[in-house]
Each structure stands twice: as structure tokens, then as C-alpha cells.
Image (cartoon, rainbow, N blue to C red):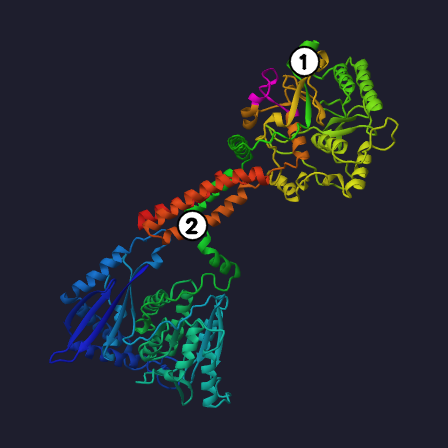
Amino acid sequence: MVSIFHLKVERIEQVEQVCVFELSWGQAQQLRVTLSYPKPLSQLYQNWQQVYLGFYNQALRGRLVKGGKLEPTPIDWHAKLIKAETQLLSEFHHWLRSRELTEIRDTIVEAAMAKMQPNSASETASNTGVDVLISASPIEVARLPWEAWEIGSRFAASKIRIARTCRNIRDYSQVSIKSRGKARVLAILGDDRGLDFQREKKALQSFSKQLDVQLIGWQGKTDQRTPTELRTEIAQKIADPLGWDILFFAGHSNEASGLGGELAIAPNVSLYLTELQASIKTALKNGLQFAIFNSCKGLDLAETLISLGLNQVAVMREPIHNQVAEEFLLRFLSYLVQHQDAHDALLSACRSLKSEQQYTYPSASLIPSLCRYPGATVYRLPEHSGDWWGQLRQKLKPILPTKKEAIALSALLLSSWQLSTQEWLLDRRVYLQALYRQLTEQIETTIPQPVLMIAVDEESIRKVGLSDPRPMDRRYLGEIINQLNRLNTQVIGLDYLIDRPANDQGENDQILAKAVQEAIQQDQTWFIFASKIKQAGVWWDVIDTVAQPEWSLQGDMRVLGDPPTYMSVLPIPQPDSEQRLPISYLLALGYWMNFEISDHPPQPQLKATTSFLSQLKAHVIDTIGDSYQSVFSARANLHPLTNQAYLLRQWWLQPLIDYSIPPDQIYRLIPAWQLLEQPDQISWPSDPHVILIAPWGYGEAGVDQEGEDNYLLPTAVQYWRHRIPLDLRPSVFPGAEAHAYMTHHFLNRRLVIPIPDLWMILLAAVFAKGLTLLIRQASSKQRLRRMGLLAAATLLYGFLSFQLYISGNILLPILFPIATIWVYVMFALLEKKSYG
């Protein structure tokens, strides 16, 4: 924040003239000194003023004269003006360097030096520094060039700005700052005799992207309005309900004691500010913040407007030449639209006049002054004014991240985007969900296991004497099916790819085919065979000699991830394409049709002429009035957003396989060797179930290569492994186990949707930004209390996330969102600790 000093300078008429300097700042701190007023100073000011008027002897905006150019004269007025200015400033600076003012100067300079470093990460050098607001009396003292006081000239890095304020100030509460797009400017053009406003009009119009300018006033000789009509129009326009941000006047003006200043609005027609008080008060209520009078002798004008509550007024203290006024306005506006505040813009314009136009317009830089209301923020054009995108960014600026926050946020987003990171976090999260389930005793034990797994494990291979189980012996599979057929099983799935005749297994293929056909003929058993895509539009299907699509089903055996993490859901139908349902979905469909619906479902017939899947689809439509895709949860269908996310290599909204459920709640294991050799010792389940014949962890399991069907063991499954008999406990994760989980999830509509980390990080960043704003505004005690609340909220969010996973089938990320919030908060705390 800018530090404000108020300096009151009052000349007292005694035997010897003295000036009282009274400096006030902060918490009612004050310094008061008395200093002799130098007699030569008034005379030097008068000499300078006379020479100044002599140099600019035409087209002054304080009196009406003909012409508009600077004409050469026999007297070297330029040299005389430079000399007079030098003498005036020399005496002025000498007076202000008096020993009596040392403490006042040092106090201001020390504050400026302390402000050289920003007080917080949100402050910059442009909004820190020291402003000295001077009110001087009588008028002869007020007219002195106080802006030229070199208070901190020895310290180049210090920033001290001098402005003026008024002795009499009324209530400020009338001002109402409004948010707009472009800044609205009311430009009043007065009597132009001897003047030319074309450059000022062009200057205002050249910044049309930032300024919404409306011109009013006298229109020249063609203007037929009466003085009353002109005064009325100006007063009504100032009080426009839409409001103005800036009020601009160009023309002749003059001081007018007791009348607030005089504006020449037409030839021989004047308007006094006292006549405009009601309109100006209305304008303040409608958002008027700044006024600039590009006319002469404006101290009375400024005094009146500031006393009414206007934030700032830029005026010319002395008569000013038309060309100088035009040049000043152009420079001032150019700095203002660069988003300097009005004070800096005025100082920059004056410095520019002095450095670039010193020989053309000498002493012109001494004329402009800014008068300010002490408690108001210096006016600045809205950033990106006139640019809708810039305006939007400006409105969003409070919630946009700082540089440190942006770096941290980018790092978190980049980390969350990595599939390896996502899969690792999901694996650990599901493991924690398993712990949470067990801790809170939320393990459902009443739901029957839907899958009976016939596990072809290493012991089964050894007992049957298979030297190479890849591909699996078809005779062996046929024997398993024959045994199951004796037990009257209804649905059998094979997690083996039987896509081509195996070498030396011609007879074995016939044995397998016979077993399948006998089961269908005797018990109308459903068979679901595994298939796998070979290339676009080409699938490895079960060979015709073993099964036909008219009386069997073929399901996609692929799983997603290693270990399998995501559900194999139903793809979005494509025109003219044969979509393959996951084998787990077909197993669930077989369970549902055979054990859960009352109507008798279609049964496979060896003499059927239409595909068995088509028969099932038609039956589902007749039964529930909808397609097979609506049998289970709508989440079983691929979400369009998920489909698009594949292009970004993401798995957004793809349902998860919930390994937090113990495997003994998903399937029951029977080793294949026991089914064949000790069927009488098996306690066969009485509850409905489907059969899945599958490889169970032996090293050769796979289609394209050995071990392909053995995946990494999910951490949650590893946690539950103790619930599986030791002799059937593989060290790997068989693909069939994922199929069993997915079958269970379809039947129980247990499809957990993970909310993407990316989404939650962005949401957390917005929430965290609001927290940081509260923290920066809080006291130390309040910060501690809010940190306690945030810690409690973090724990509550974690608990709710764990419970929502179980109760609502939604996985809310924990690590990344919480990390985002705490990173933001820590930045805010460190910032407060460093600068508070």
C-alpha cells in the first residue's frame, strides 16, 4: 500500500512573514515547524509568471485572443523564460532545503526508502511508495510549483509523489465506484474562439478501444442553442444515469472566488461550478472518479470538485497555450491507457514535456497539477479496458494463481496426467478401501458367489501329465465339461482361446466338440467362449468344429491394465460393426436370464438358424422393453466422454474393478483335478452360479506368449489372499479372476466411477484460492483457528471419500486435491510470515 503524508503549509502575515509546515501521517502522528517565508520568492514567482505569459502570448486558454500559433517576437522570450524559471526554482528549492524542514524531509524519505521492497507477494513497485498531499494557503503560496520539490532526489530508488489536496472537504460517501467495460468519458468542449480542439478530439478518439467517449458542448457558429439550453444540456449530461468514469473539459476557464471556478462554454457564455453541484453529486453517485480540466487557472475548479467528494482532478494552475494543452492531453492519455494511475500518468506526461519539448514549450511541465481526495485510491483505467477477454481475466484475477501457485499447480496437473501415476494411486487407494471395509465391517456376506471357478492350476496340469499346456489339451477341457454336464450346470464359460485346430489334437477337438454338443442337447447348457481381436474387424473366434454362433456365445477376453484396473464395459455401437461383449458381461447376462427373470429365456438349439446372441437380444427387448445394454447399470455402457478421453490416453469415468471386496465373496474355487478325480468330495453350491473354466496361474498361460494371462497382483487382492486356500493361492493375478470380479460387478451393479484427478485438482485450486484470500486477511489467531478447521475438513473429506466409494460407487481422489489445497495454503502462510 502507498503511504500517505498530509502536509499543510500556511503563510502567516506577521511583522515578518512566516510559513507553518504541519506534517501528519499514520496514527495521528504529526510534525509542526515554522519557517520564514523568503521575500524574494513571491517576486521571483511574479517575474516568472510575467515572462511565461509573455512567451505564450497567444491562444491562451484563459482569455480570448485571435490566432493559434506561436509567433516570433523581437524579444528573446525563450531565454528570459528559462532564466526566470531557473531563478524561481533555485530560490524555491533553497527555501525547502532549510534546516528547519530537515525532520519533515527525513520522515518522508525514510518512509519512501522502507517502501522500496514490496510488503507482500501481491504488491509491486508500482503500487508502493509515498504520496505527499499538500494543501497551501493563501492562493499565492498554493500557486508555487510544489510538484517540483525534490524531497528524495538523493535517493533515486525512492518513490515520492506530490499532489495537492484541499483545505475544506465534505463527505466522501457520495462516490460510488462502478465496474464497467470501457471507461466512460464525458468530454465537454467549450468556447473555442482562438483555440482548436481537433487534436484533442483525435486524441480521445484514438483510444476508442479503452475509452467510450461522448462529446458535447458548443458546436461553433452554426450552433443555434440559447445559453440556457446549452447550460441545461451540460448539466443533464453530467447527471446521466449511466454514469461517467472521467469528466473532461477543454476551453477557456478562470478562477472565480466564491463561484467554484468559471468555464467558458460558448462565446460570452460562462458556467460556474456552483451551478453544477447537483449534477456533479449525481455523477459521483453514478461512478464519476476523475476529472481533467485542460484549461487555465484551475485551482478553484479543483478545490470545488474535491470538496464535493470527487477522487481526483487534474488541472492547469496557470494559463496554458492551446498547443501545450493538446500535447499534454495526448501524452497523459497515452500513459493512462498503459494502466498507469492518474498521478503517475500526469507525472510521466510532465517529465515527457520537460525532456522532449523543453525548447518548444519551456516551463510547460510546471503547470499541470493533480488534486486528490486524501482517502481515495488513485484512479486507474480498468486493466484490458475495451478488451472483453482482458475484462474477463481482470474479473477472474483474484482467483487466478500467483506465479508460485501456477508452478505448483502445473506440476500437480502434469503428475496426475501420467497413466503410470494414476494406476499406482488407484492400486493403493483400492488397497486402503479394503482396509477401510474390514475396519468398518462393511463386507457383505449374504450375497451368494455368482462365479464357480474351475481352476486349471499347476497341480491339475501335473496330475494329468501335460508336458506343454500351451495350447491347452482340448481332450482335457472336454473331460471337464463332461463332468460338469453330469452336475447339470446351466452356464459355462471358457477362458481359453480355441481359435484354430491344434497340432496333433484333431481327435481331441472332436472330443471337446462332442462334450459341448451333448451338454447343449441334454441340458441346454449355455456356452460362452473366449475371443480376441486380431486386427481391425478380424477376431480370433472359436473354431467351427467345436461350436457355432447359432448355439453358443463369444465374448471378448481382454482386460484393461496390468494389473487389470478398469472394467471392460460395453462399447459405443458403431454402424455396420459387430461389437463384442466382454466375456464377463455375457456370463452375467447368462446368470440374469437363467436365474433372475421369471420368463423362460431362449435356450441353445443345435438346429438353430439364427445367432444365439440375436435371440437373446430380442428376448431382452420383449422382457424389459429395452436393449441388452440396459439390463445392468447404465454405467456398464461406455460413456461418450470416456470414449473421447481415449484420444488423450486417459481413462476418465471408466468404471473400476473393486478389489476392495474379498475374492471369496466373488467366486468359489474348485481345482480341475479335484473336479475330475474327487467329485464326491466337493461340496457343490446350492445357490445359482455360472461356471468359468480358466487357467489359474501356471507359467504357460497365455495366447500370444507364455505368461500373458498372468498379471501383476493388485495390492488389495494381495491383502485378501489369505482368504484363499493355500494350495490354490497363486503368486500372480490370473486374468480369469478379473473376469469373475467384473461378472460380480455387473450382476450387483457395483460399478465404481473414478472422478479424474485433473478435475478435482482444478476444483481444489479454486477452493484453495478462496482460502488463501481469507488467510491473507486473517490475524495470527484467526489463521491458527482456520488451520485447525482446514485440518479437520481434510480428515472429514478423506472419510467421506472412503465411504462414498462404498455407498455411492464414486471414487473421489484424495491425494492430489488435498495436496493442491495445502500447497496453496502453505504459500499463503509463508507469505504472511515473511511480510506480515
Q: Bin the neighbour count of mark 2 within 10 Å (Cα to Cα): few under 14, some 14-19, many 20 and up.
A: some
Instruction: Work out how far the residue at label 2 is from the one at label 1, CA to CA, in angstroms.
Output: 62 Å
Residue at the image point whose x is 85% and y is 33% from the top: 610
> Image quarter for residue 661?
top right
To which residue does mark 2 refer?
771
State the mark number for residue 414: none
Packing grade of label 1 (10 A; few <14, some 14-19, many >=20) is some
- Magenta stretch contains residue 388: no
**Which residues make up the magenta segment?**
721-736
Against 205, residue 620 (above or below) is: above
- Percent of width and height locating residue 346: 35, 68
Q: Is residue 529 left or right of residue 98?
A: right
**Drawn side of residue 136 relative to residue 810, left or right:** left
Q: Amino acid at mark 1?
A: Ser
Looking at the rendered structure, which numbered label has been put on residue 460?
1
In the depicted structure, whether residue 634 falls above or below residue 150: above
Residue 20 percent across, percent down from the top left: 17, 73
771 and 400: which is toward the camera = 771
Q: Is residue 191 above or below residue 105?
A: below
Q: Is residue 819 visible from the viewing direction of this image?
A: no
Image coordinates of residue 507 in percent, x first then y, are 81, 13
Q: Is residue 46 visible?
A: yes
- Quarter of the image that includes the N terminus: bottom left
Amino acid on which disc 2 is placed: Leu
Give the SS element for disc 2: helix
Q: Position of residue 147 (x, y in %)?
A: 28, 69
Magenta-colored stretch includes residue 733:
yes
Residue toward you, 452 or 246: 452
